[in-house]
Amino acid sequence: MPVYRGPKKAKRHSTLIHEAVDVVNLLQRLEEVKRILPGLIRPGGSKSTVVLKVVDEPACLKVTVVGGSAVQELRIYTASHAMVRAELEKAFVVR
């Protein structure tokens, strides 16, 4: 599995599922994103396309990446939840 490296990475967990790599690469390019915190990886997922679930939380956006055989949550710390959500909706299937 890929390991996430970058200036916006939180210090602990850094492993990403393959389907989350493109999501993180997009988020790294956005100036509004201050920090990306990859969460635990769980088995599951769907055999079809990559699907994102985006939930607004008080301090961050919780983005759940549902991939082919695994599911991973990302916490995205940003000043503009709406702008980041719009960028994700342009690039990926968001439910």
Image (cartoon, grey):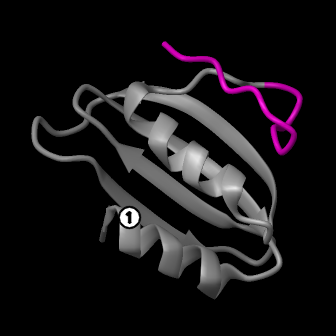
- In the depicted view, which residue is nearer to us: 43 or 68? 68
The residue that appears at 45% across and 26% down in the rendered structure is 17
Secondary structure character of the magenta stretch overall? loop
Q: Taking 13 as reference, is 45 above or below it?
A: below
In this picture, residue 2 sits left or right of residue 45 = right
Residue 39 lies within the magenta run = no
Residue 6 lies within the magenta run = yes
Instruction: Identify the image quadrant of residue 14.
Output: top right
Residue 66 coordinates in the image, percent (x, y):
33, 44
- In the depicted view, which residue is nearer to us: 25 or 57? 25
Instruction: Identify the image quadrant of residue 56.
Output: bottom right
Residue found at the far front of this picture: 29
Q: Taking 7 as reference, is 60 above or below it?
A: below
The residue that appears at 50% across and 81% down in the rendered structure is 86
Q: Which residues are magenta?
A: 1-12
Q: Which residue is mark 1?
A: 91
Residue 28 coordinates in the image, percent (x, y):
70, 50
Q: Work out which quarter of the rendered image holds the C terminus and state it.
A: bottom left
